[in-house]
Amino acid sequence: MNTDAIKRLQEAKAEAKQNPALAAALSGNFDLEKSELLTKISQAIHGRGQQLAEQLGLRKKGKSFFCPHPENHAHGEKHPSLVVDNRTGRFRCFGASCGISGSLVKLAEELGSSDPWGTIVQICGISLNKEEQHHLENLRKKDVRW
Ligand SMILES: [Zn+2]
């Protein structure tokens, strides 16, 4: 393996920590069709995680957001304590007694969506072919966390 290939693999492994589809691919446990849907969603989120979080109804102040669970914050949330990675859409609340974190799908759920997967697909403006719709149904049914 040349130096470039090693570097690319290291980058892929670093990114895989944020991307289950890629992680599955690297581990050899690769469900191609399911991964294609997740990859499509990842690509749609890429670079606009914060904008999508706002569309989900999260309130932004400066570079951070107010947590959807003020009840987890002992003295209320005077300063916004939740951050959203613009690239991956993953979020984390840094409130000491809170600490919720996860993907935009999880965030949609935290904000009360009864169909978090469908909500994300919709606000990302993704159009799914028949096969992908079927996979989306599977993600809903299996209650997959991403
Ligand atoms: Zn919180």
Image: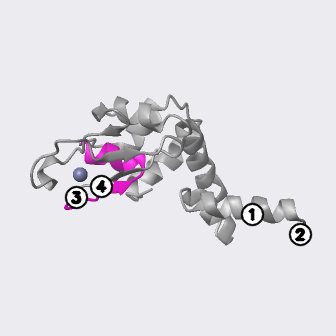
Q: Secondary structure at mark 4?
A: loop
Q: Is residue 107 above or below residue 125?
A: below
Residue 15 as seen in the image, left or right of residue 11? left
Contact (CB < 8 A) between labels 1 and 2? Answer: yes
Instruction: Give the CA separation, mark 2 to mark 4.
Output: 41 Å
Q: How is the image coloured?
A: one colour
In space, the residues marked 4 and 1 are separated at their CA atoms by 31 Å
Determine contact: label 3, label 4, CB under 8 Å: yes
Q: Confirm or deny contact between disc 3 and disc 2 (CB under 8 A).
A: no
Tell me where residue 69 appears, x and y as whole percent: 19, 48
At x 71%, y 64%, the residue is 10
Residue at mark 3 = 98
- Identify which residue is drawn at 22% across, 42% down: 79
Q: Which kind of residue does numbered mark 4 sit on?
A: Phe
Closer to the chain start, of discs 1 and 2, is 2
Q: Of marks 4 and 1, which one's residue comes earlier in the chain? A: 1
